[in-house]
Amino acid sequence: MASIHWILFSARNQVKKLGGDGNIRKICPFSLATPKDEDKGDEDFESMSMDKGVISKLLKDFFEEEFPNQGTDLEYTTDLLNDWFVDSLGIINTVLFLERKFAISLARADINSDNFQNINTLSSFVRKSLG
């Protein structure tokens, strides 16, 4: 399995080859690719409790809506990298979702199989990032 870093690096290089500047957010066809001035996080989320249960539920809803996987039930322990993501754009879309929904910034080192293993590990990472 390719590392997530390599997938993101490859996606950025493909954007550059197509004449872009490597900014995936500008060309991403998903609904979460918004201009920077609109990328301020979700105001409804700010008023909600920031506990791990709420974060987990928001992540589960996101994965089920954005990446429907027929024949597999998504659990909080489902392996996201092997059993749920369709392709590398799924990882990119998830990073965009995390940055927008929770108003956090992810560094390259944050995008790894430990944090993205399942909803439980990802929600723990988000909770830690929120402080």
Image (spheres, grey):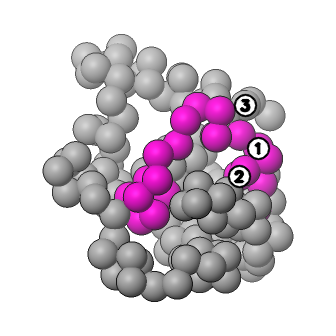
Residue corresponding to mark 1: 113
Q: Position of residue 25 (x, y in %)?
A: 32, 41
Callout 2 amino acid = Phe
Callout 3 amino acid = Ser
Residue 90 visible in this rendered orientation of the protein: no
* Callout 2 secondary element: loop
| Residue drawn at 62 percent across, 79 percent down | 51
- Tell me the crowding category of disc 3: few under 14, some 14 to 19, or many 20 or more residues within 10 angstroms, Cα based: few
Callout 1 amino acid = Ser
Q: Position of residue 68 (x, y in %)?
A: 57, 70
Give the extent of the magenta segment.
97-118
Mark found first going from the N terminus, 1 or 3: 3
Residue 11 visible in this rendered orientation of the protein: yes
Q: CA distance from mark 1 to mark 3?
A: 8 Å
Relative side of 36 to 85, left or right: left
Q: CA distance from mark 1 to mark 2?
A: 5 Å
Circles 1 and 3, Cβ within 8 Å, touching? The answer is yes
* Callout 3 secondary element: loop
Q: Position of residue 30 (x, y in %)?
A: 35, 55
- From the viewer's perspective, is residue 76 above or below residue 33? below
Residue corresponding to mark 2: 116
Circles 1 and 2, Cβ within 8 Å, touching? The answer is yes
Q: CA distance from mark 3 to mark 2?
A: 11 Å
- From the viewer's perspective, is residue 87 above or below residue 61? above
Whether residue 8 appears in magenta in the rendering, the answer is no
Mark toward the viewer: 3 or 2: 2
Nearer to us in this view, 68 or 45: 45
Mark found first going from the N terminus, 3 or 2: 3
Q: Residue 3 got which mark? A: 3
Relative side of 99 to 68, left or right: left
Nearer to us in this view, 42 or 74: 42
Q: Position of residue 67 (x, y in %)?
A: 55, 65
